[in-house]
Image: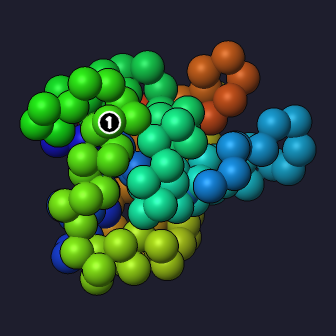
Amino acid sequence: MPPVSLGRSIRRTAIPLLAFGAPALTGCGSDEQRVEKTLTTYLTAVVEADGPTACAQLAPAARDDLVSSVAGARDCEDAVRRYRSGLTAQQREELRTARVTEVSIEGDRATARVAGAESGSLEQVEGEWRISARSPAGR
């Protein structure tokens, strides 16, 4: 299963987010805003089949998990394109309009909730928030 799942009807939709195409903010805004931007950049990139941008939002282990979870994927960018091609119009719209409703940060780890979905986990990689391979236990 991909690193982030969104639950309900969009559960299958959420490949390692996990919201979300511009790159994550660097050096500006609060950590909570940067976490939200990473997620929204990722989800938008998935909807647009923008593999480079989507993959840039993932921690290395999450990229590896994504590739191994999408049949026939050669690399992360290919996995995003293949995954996106299997989404229905409704799933794409749910991803496009997904909103982060809560962010909790503890040191170099964060948990974010997307409205109507499960929590997703992020970690700092070289000073940037990236979507993690797995959600923290109990979340």
Amino acid type indicated by mark 1:
Asp
Counting the numbered discs, the total is: 1
Q: Is residue 42 left or right of residue 119?
A: right
The residue located at (24%, 66%) in the rendering is 87
- Compare residues 135 and 72 and report the one nearer the observer: 72
Q: Is residue 107 left or right of residue 52?
A: right
The residue located at (32%, 25%) in the rendering is 75
Dividing the picture into quadrants, the one containing residue 31 is top right
- Compare residues 113 and 9 and report the one nearer the observer: 9
Above or below, comparing residue 16 to residue 5 in the picture: above
Residue sitting farthest toward the right: 28
Residue sitting farthest toward the left: 71
- Residue 136 at x, y percent in the picture: 34, 37
The residue located at (28%, 38%) in the rendering is 79
The residue located at (85%, 50%) in the rendering is 29
Above or below, comparing residue 85 to residue 70 in the picture: below
* Pointer 1 residue: 78
Can you see residue 109?
no
- Residue 24 at x, y percent in the picture: 70, 43
Can you see residue 41?
yes
Above or below, comparing residue 34 to residue 76 in the picture: below
- Compare residues 75 and 31 and report the one nearer the observer: 75
Per the image, label 1 sits on a secondary structure element best described as helix
**Snapshot colouring:** rainbow
- Residue 2 at x, y percent in the picture: 25, 41
- Residue 50 at x, y percent in the picture: 49, 49
Q: Quadrant of the N terminus?
A: top left
**Crowding near pointer 1: few (<14 within 10 Å), some, many (20+)?**
many
